[in-house]
Amino acid sequence: MNVFKRTFRFYYDGFSNLPRWGKQVWLVILIKLFIMFIILKIFFFPNFLKTNFNNDSDRSNHVLENLTNIN
């Protein structure tokens, strides 16, 4: 447990002592990651298997057919 406490303290002290511009850079990075992984996933990458097949066996058969198709 002492290792986790020291690791947390290390990062906490490092982020709390950042200058103003460093905190702004981290805010921009977090906003960009949120947009890339949450917003883009919702709107541009729908769950194809869940919407087109009713059960797990149909989904697995579709995936297996596409993986083993030699075309």
Image (cartoon, helix red, strand yellow):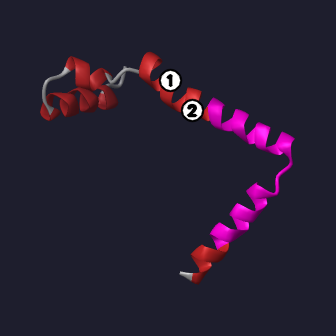
Q: Please say if 27 is above or below 65.
A: below
Q: Which residue is at 13% across, 34% downward?
A: 57
Q: Please say if 50 is above or below 12.
A: above
Front one among 34 and 49: 34
Residue ID for mark 2: 34
Expressed as whole percent of the image width and height from the top left, the position of residue 58 reads: 15, 28
Q: Quadrant of residue 56?
A: top left
Expressed as whole percent of the image width and height from the top left, the position of residue 62 reads: 23, 26
Residue 38 in magenta stretch: no
Residue 15 in magenta stretch: yes
Q: Quadrant of residue 42?
A: top left
Task: Report the magenta residues as a range.
Answer: 7-32
Q: Please say if 32 is above or below 15.
A: above
Q: Dots 1 and 2: beta carbons under 8 Å?
A: yes
The overriding secondary structure of the stretch rendered in magenta is helix
Dot 1: what SS? helix
Label 1 vs 2, first from the N-terminus: 2
Residue type beneath disc 2? Phe
Expressed as whole percent of the image width and height from the top left, the position of residue 50 reads: 24, 25
Residue type beneath disc 1? Ile
Q: CA distance from mark 1 to mark 2?
A: 7 Å
Q: Which residue is at 21% across, 34% downward?
A: 60
Instruction: Classify the position of the C terminus by image quarter.
Output: top left
Left or right of 57? Residue 52 is right
Q: Residues within 10 Å of mark 1 (few under 14, many from 20)?
A: few
Front one among 70 and 26: 26
The furthest residue to the bottom: 2
Q: Which residue is at 72% across, 33% downward?
A: 28
Residue ID for mark 1: 39
